[in-house]
Amino acid sequence: MPLIDRHTSGVYVIAATPFADDGALDLASIDSLVDYYAARGVDGMTVLGVMGEAPKLAPDEARAALGRFIGRAGSLPVIAGVSAAGMGALAGLSQFAMDKGAAGVMVAPPPSLSTEDTVAGYYAAVCKALGPDIPVCFQDYPQLTGVKVSPATILKLTRDHPQIVMLKHEDCPGLNKLSAVRAAEAQGSPRMSILCGNGGLYLAQEMQRGADGAMTGFAYPEMLVGVVHRHLKGDVDGAEDLFDAWLPLIRHEQQPGLGLAIRKEVLRRRGAIASSAVRAPGPKLTAADLAELDRLIARTEARVAALGERLAA
Amino acid sequence: MPLIDRHTSGVYVIAATPFADDGALDLASIDSLVDYYAARGVDGMTVLGVMGEAPKLAPDEARAALGRFIGRAGSLPVIAGVSAAGMGALAGLSQFAMDKGAAGVMVAPPPSLSTEDTVAGYYAAVCKALGPDIPVCFQDYPQLTGVKVSPATILKLTRDHPQIVMLKHEDCPGLNKLSAVRAAEAQGSPRMSILCGNGGLYLAQEMQRGADGAMTGFAYPEMLVGVVHRHLKGDVDGAEDLFDAWLPLIRHEQQPGLGLAIRKEVLRRRGAIASSAVRAPGPKLTAADLAELDRLIARTEARVAALGERLAA
Amino acid sequence: MPLIDRHTSGVYVIAATPFADDGALDLASIDSLVDYYAARGVDGMTVLGVMGEAPKLAPDEARAALGRFIGRAGSLPVIAGVSAAGMGALAGLSQFAMDKGAAGVMVAPPPSLSTEDTVAGYYAAVCKALGPDIPVCFQDYPQLTGVKVSPATILKLTRDHPQIVMLKHEDCPGLNKLSAVRAAEAQGSPRMSILCGNGGLYLAQEMQRGADGAMTGFAYPEMLVGVVHRHLKGDVDGAEDLFDAWLPLIRHEQQPGLGLAIRKEVLRRRGAIASSAVRAPGPKLTAADLAELDRLIARTEARVAALGERLAA
Amino acid sequence: MPLIDRHTSGVYVIAATPFADDGALDLASIDSLVDYYAARGVDGMTVLGVMGEAPKLAPDEARAALGRFIGRAGSLPVIAGVSAAGMGALAGLSQFAMDKGAAGVMVAPPPSLSTEDTVAGYYAAVCKALGPDIPVCFQDYPQLTGVKVSPATILKLTRDHPQIVMLKHEDCPGLNKLSAVRAAEAQGSPRMSILCGNGGLYLAQEMQRGADGAMTGFAYPEMLVGVVHRHLKGDVDGAEDLFDAWLPLIRHEQQPGLGLAIRKEVLRRRGAIASSAVRAPGPKLTAADLAELDRLIARTEARVAALGERLAA
């Protein structure tokens, strides 16, 4: 499997972790989920992220899930989320992932960090613990971690550590941060691959600002693929038209907390996973939520279909 | 001027506070801004909210702005944001507002509150300080205040204090909270007027869940008015069609921090205010931001115009 | 081993988890650490708490440590910290602990909870997952979890769930919360055992407010035992004299973040554990820190010795 | 009145702001409070800080209080807290303070700042707005502001802006941050005056790490003066002995939130101010709090008196 590098582009979908109704890890659904993503044209997957409910997995479950995802993915690159409270656990899971054939690892700063120099110190320790051969994606997600990082610190990380090749961009507002990283590159800073998160809520604008693609978990990966690939081929307007058509559902699925339950319900309906269960403690959809989702899906699918006819015409 | 009550509905637009390029309060632009809002059919205004940069106003400026807004508004009801660190300042500004003719006051819990019983205690003190004749809107905005409030506490507030007649709903995710308040009313809890914030990002769904309208600050008030009034007249689908057409711009303007600068830039372009200045410290739009905004506006206006033809047809 | 109940009192020391210099779990040091605590007269131990670096343990390590602690403790009751991101992991670890002979489990609310009704809902789910026979200590530590809980909610938890028998009190300021719980008991609310944390920083006052003892991790357990047991025997002044003599060191060890490294260094010096290593990422003591600690220890030991002569006289 | 500079040392007590029982600003008590502080040997005062309830003052009240403090202080230097949500308000209050004879201003970063480069940008704007002649104290208080600042950023601020001459040090744990600033000075970074806050909880250690004094608000200023002045004269042990004797009360008064009510109650009892009122919303002492305070004071005064005899002997 190829490793991620500073020019990686496309859609690395954040994979959900499927559970049975009773909360048990559902390995068979991992297979169907991988097939579902692959059939819709994603360029890779990221597994064991926050949206993959990684913190709720026991370590043996994490390894079982990771192995299954990578095994089923075949030639499709898989990035492993390895954020963990202890450095030993992080390094151990990373090595396991790479041995299984992962394309790289993703690391978010732990919430216990405070100032930006402690962030730099932490990533120096991470790189030392991993050894120089494992490529790393830096996840910049202050809404979740509480750790705020300047563009200058991101640039320092990727300059000091050649293995930090990718930025998962999901600060918000973050468009100017993305532009700042790209501007620094124009001044000689080493290039980073930038893939964008935040449920895709700003994806069209992020591509126009110079992102290389998406790394997020929308339940209809064809939206992510359609927007990113159209854009990369130069069809900026078509990409944004498609994005806008999907936006009511993107925004709905991006609600903090509740969004994961919505996403899994859609994946279940589409046959990608057997159960929409989110591990406790987690949100459950109410009858009102389900009716609302029915309506939003019907409206979105009609709008996208109409657009498809127009784009094809 | 009529007071807000438990059945108030429609659009109470959150008014920007206009400043000159040098940061001075621009009273003349208050007049043009009020006229701009009124011409687009809003049902009322809320002034001196967070989006009105209230914390950056000196008290004499706050009173000058408030007086000017209310004076120009004529028969249009005006709700005064009066959240302040000290109870005396809050009560004093409230009395000033009511004397000038305000329709009620809006109070958010101060960040220093912790548990929900301290919230209840705080609003008891607020109501005592205001006296029983000033109607109060409870602003539920935990993303800003850090104060988390259960539906049970909201219901207790409005039950214990007849003057707490309105909920400004902007928790997120918040749709089920809105439903919980409405469900309690069906069981005998006193009705509240519920107007929704969060930049309107969930407005169509909130109306479908039983909201009475919007209280937020989108730069094109005709969107808020169109969606809310269509919905109140029973055209649920038309309201949502209109909402969806505007959504790319709604989402763009709702970015935390940056959104206010975008909003003021649009208001300036449309002649509602003379300068887009945000008081320091505050965001400034970059060249990339401005080009992006041009593109989003052009696309949105074309989409809304096309929809208008279809809705009219 | 007896179970904790509503009348449990004394000192349940929060046990450090010993690691070797290379970060490996050091099971042999668990034995010496248990012996160290037992020799100084503690009434029980709490293991796998935050100060026990539980989040940095792999699950198999957590079980190995837990088994070793309980095995060595003999008749000394051991409470197991079982807070975990997933309910299944929490219940599994709890059952493991009880099967090994634990006296009960301690559960803190996960940071993802928001309003107090979600706290109540979470503990209902916890109690259901545990079954009715496992006694639970509710850990109230908002400085760490961000979850703020009124006395009313604590009282509801212990009333609704007979198995929630103990409060680990470490809100700050928290003295009036402690008094509020005791006052409610005087009005008929079921009694809770209240053991206090926060590094013992308010221990003398907490005992005077009606606490049953301490559950915290000071490196000199003889201080905790001396203060609590003297107080329980009625020597209120002597207990506070002893507390005051230790306070400079208590306060020093209670510094957030750094305190754990200080504590482990003291435990190492006293022969309780083989290495003062804190698992990465974690603080390391500088030369200045070590010299400062030398000075504080020398001064404290002299003061305590002088007091001992006076108390004995 | 002399201005603060890079060598300022001693005790700049954080002055409480006195209110009448009904919450009105009590100007007469400002006079008695200044006299109280002066009689106990402080080297200066800092007014309108957080502990001075500055956010609860109307701007005209802030100016009235500031003028009264400075007028009464005579030759005693007064630093004015001028943190405000808007840059114009900050600059206006600063100019007012300097015109009245203040020795400098203190500015904390506003909570809306995020990354450390935004902190640097904010202070550049502050210095520009103030002009080069007003000396500035940078308040580093992340527990309150949420803004985390590396030593490198503090050093950059004082290097880039000659007028930023003083650090109010109250990060926690912060002893190594203090040492880092002093170590950088030894390498050629410009010297800063460092005065310490946090209620004095670490004052003895901070002096030993190289602080120049205290800037905090303990109700017995003779403790601050005694510890700092003894230390500056070279009596390190005597300074720490005195500190330790006071520590039970220092720690008690330093409780977040509640501490201010305790401090004002002590100031009232000692005749420094007429009323212990804290402006709403704020804590009120219960009967249990008052009895506890009586006991702590009696014990502390006895201990300090005994120590005094020993130190004098």
Image (cartoon, coloured by chain):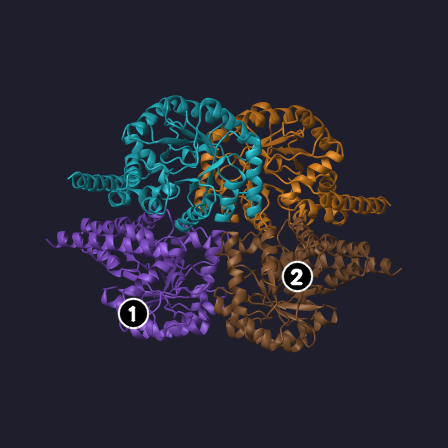
Chain colours: A purple, B cyan, C brown, D orange
Estimate the x, y position of residue A252 in percent, counting from the top left: 33, 52
Identify the residue under disc 1: A34
| Type of the residue with mark 2 | Thr
The foreground one among D166 and A220 is A220
Estimate the x, y position of residue B243 in percent, counting from the top left: 27, 43
Which quadrant is the C terminus of chain C positioned in? bottom right
Q: Is residue C33 left or right of residue B18?
A: right
Residue C81: name its quadrant.
bottom right
The disc placed on residue D86 is: none
Which quadrant is the N terminus of chain C positioned in? bottom right
Chain letter of the residue carrying label 2: C
Q: Is residue A265 left or right of residue D128?
A: left
Q: Is the residue at mark 1 from the same chain as the one at mark 2? A: no
Identify the residue under disc 2: C216
Estimate the x, y position of residue A44 in percent, counting from the top left: 29, 65
Q: Is residue A146 above or below residue D144?
A: below
Chain letter of the residue carrying label 1: A
Mark 2 element type: loop
Residue C8: name its quadrant.
bottom right
The foreground one among B39 and C216 is B39
The residue depicted at 56 percent of the width and 23 percent of the height is: D99
Q: Is residue A90 above or below residue A177?
A: below
